[in-house]
Structures are given as structure tokens and as C-alpha cells.
Image (tube, rainbow, N blue to C red):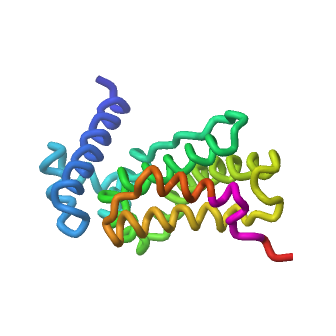
Amino acid sequence: MGRESASGDAQRKVLDAVAELLTELGYLELTVDKVAKRAGVTRKTIYRRWPHKAALVGELLIRDARMDTVPELGDSRAELRRLFELILRDVQEEGSRVLPALWANMGDPAVMERFRREVIAPRRLDARAVVQRAIARGDLPSDTDVDLLIDTWSGVVQFRSEVRRDVFLASQADELVDLALRGGVPRLRS
């Protein structure tokens, strides 16, 4: 086995161990020692690639981020509803593990910048494209504040899911999409 494939195998084992331990213990109880033991590698192997726990967890968040896109369907409601489903998935499925780790990584600007660049920015571009297609079709007002609409939907889902610990129902997502299509969107100021 070549050095590169052995290195890739060790990286996979380490990140898999981080994922398991985050789920079992949470971010605060996660340590490099525990990761090394679970992955069957030395601490030196970990520190050679990741300078600290935050970088290690940041790498996992980037590796495991799902990057689905909303296809052009020719139907604004269907596309906006699919966008909302992706927002729900990203918060609810990733949220229990990702959000505490992400907040902990805020102390490391390099980790956060990489997460923004490799995960948030591509997701954001796709979300903007979906809303802009609905505007181009005349289904949303031309002065829709695209970024604020996306932030509003993301914020509502995150608050309901993470802070209130409420289930976000499909009917509630439908209502927010229908509200937007009726013109209930934030507007750009002239």
C-alpha cells in the first residue's frame, strides 16, 4: 500500500472516529486522545495534519456536508419547496452534531473561513439561484431581498429545531413557501 493511500485511510479513520465521538460525547468531551484511540492511530498522526481539535472537527464538518442542489423544474413553488426541504435537512440532520461543533470552531478563523467557503457559499449560491428563478418567472416580487429571505427561512428552521426543539412540519414549510409566493417576502429598499 502506498504512502498516499495509507495516509488517506488514516484520515478516513480519524474523521470517522471524530464523527462517532461527537455523536456519543459531544464537542466538549471530545479529545484528540479519544480520537486517536478510537481511530487506532497516534496523536502525532493527528497533529501532523490538524493542529488542534477545532481544525479536526472543522475537517469533519466539511467532509460530511451534503451539497445537494435544487434542479430547475420550471415550477417556482416546487423549487422553493425543495429548497426549504434542503434547509430543513441541513439543520435537522446535521444540527445535533454540527451546530455545537461549528460554534466551538468560531474561535478558529481559518476553520470557519474554510467552512464558509467550501460549504456555506456553494449552498448559498444554489439557494440564491432558486429564488432568482422565481423572481425571473414573476412568481416573487422583483424587489425581493433574496439574501434576507434565505436567512429568514434558515433562521426560523434553526430556531424552531435547535432552540425550541420543536418538530418543523411539512405543512409549516408549505405555508412559508405559499406566503412568499403571495408576496410575503422581505423587500429591498430603494
Give coordinates of residue 7: x percent, y percent: 32, 37
Magenta residues (range): 179-187
Q: Residue furthest right?
A: 190
Q: Residue at x 81, y 45 (%)?
A: 137
Q: Is residue 22 left or right of residue 115?
A: left
Q: For residue 79: magenta?
A: no
Magenta residues, dominant SS class:
loop
Q: Is residue 56 left or right of residue 119?
A: left
Please determine whether, in this image, residue 8 is positioned above or below residue 171.
above
Screen quadrant of the N terminus: top left
Q: Residue at x 81, y 76 (%)?
A: 189
Give coordinates of residue 5: x percent, y percent: 34, 29
Q: Residue at x 65, y 68 (%)?
A: 148
Within the image, what quadrant is residue 57 found in?
bottom left
Q: For residue 183: magenta?
A: yes
Q: Residue at x 45, y 50 (%)?
A: 170
Give coordinates of residue 119: x percent, y percent: 52, 52
Q: 117 or 110: nearer the eye? A: 117
Q: Residue furthest top?
A: 1
Screen quadrant of the C terminus: bottom right
Q: Is residue 76 left or right of residue 97?
A: right
Give coordinates of residue 80: x percent, y percent: 62, 48
Q: 65 or 156: nearer the eye? A: 156
Q: 35 or 153: nearer the eye? A: 153
